[in-house]
Amino acid sequence: MPDPHSDAVRSATRTVEELGKLFDRLWASRSPIRTAYRAVIRSMKGANVRQAADALSTLEAVMRVVIPDELRKSVDVGLDQAKRDLTIHGLGDPVIVPPTIIQPAIDAALTTVSIQTDRAIALTQLEMGDEYTIGDDSRQGVLRPTPVIGAVTFWMTSLSSIAYTAGIGDKMGNSRRQAVAQIDSDTTQTCLNVHGQIVKAQEKFHLTGTPRYADDMIRPPFHRGCRTQIIILPEDQLDEDVTRSMRREAIEQGKKPKPSAMAGKAHYRVVGHTVQEFRNGRWHKFKTYATIREARLGAAKLNRDRRS
């Protein structure tokens, strides 16, 4: 017997997994953003003002290509979810989404880059030294890819939800929205609490727990690194048994002890290497912290931020 509610929940879970793959590629050491930053950092070593301006201009030009391309992928993920869900209900293809919906996100993400490049050129003009612009073994400089990748992943989550909602349009009629979190050991208390919550079409989700950006929000991301998505269902197809099952799943997960942050291959996001590499003695080649203990603590914190 067809179960559209369960099918829609599975569709949202697939969307989360697809976004996760996009995120992992962005955080990888050879991602386009990290590669561009490595190139500009090499060019900035000992650079004068003119050389620095040329290098930073090249970085901004590359980001104007890379960032929109990555954000468009998240729009496609959201539209694919809309197509799957409309197919479940036999409602045809998604509504055509205007490409302009992506522009505010592009502008916001590029602002993160421009803030860095403006600071870097000012520091170069003031002859403050490379340790301020590109960093050294004991500190990070103002030019670093992690804030940019963080901004891009934030907007990717947001755009996938926006594209999904726009693709559904009003085809569901009198509909409701439901939050669907990725339930695992990395799920935050906020997303455990909101998992299964149902609201009206224009109603905000009420959030409790930590971390969270606000108490009431219209759509994910609800916090940094949020993996929650939404589904839209006709009111008469909501299945209380499915919702109760979702709540039980979240409650049971919340009772489980959190695994050690150092378990497995938690990623040291500053340099894109794993804790296992630090344990194997390779950490010193990529040292940003003064001691291996600091490196491990930094890896754990950054991994929690990324996956929470």
Image: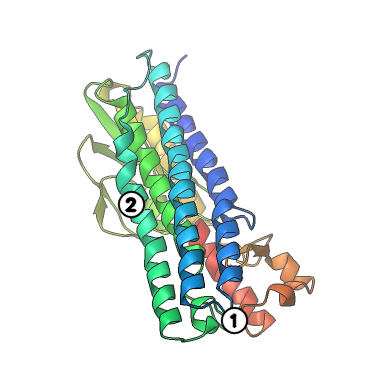
Q: Between residue 276 and residue 112, name the one nearer to us.
A: 112
Picture residue at 60% right of the left edge, 52% below the top? 31
Colour setting: rainbow
Q: Amino acid at mark 2?
A: Asp
Q: Is residue 227 visible?
A: no
Picture residue at 42% right of the left edge, 18% below the top? 88
Give the residue at mark 1. Answer: 136
134 left or right, relative to 153? right
174 left or right, relative to 42? left
Q: Between residue 134 and residue 280, name the one nearer to us.
A: 134
Q: Amino acid at mark 1?
A: Asp
Give the residue at mark 2. Answer: 107
Under circle 2, the secondary element is helix
Q: Residues within 10 Å of mark 2 (few under 14, many from 20)?
A: few
| 99 versus 274 height, above or below | above
Location of residue 287 (image quadrant): bottom right
Q: Position of residue 60 (x, y in %)?
A: 44, 58
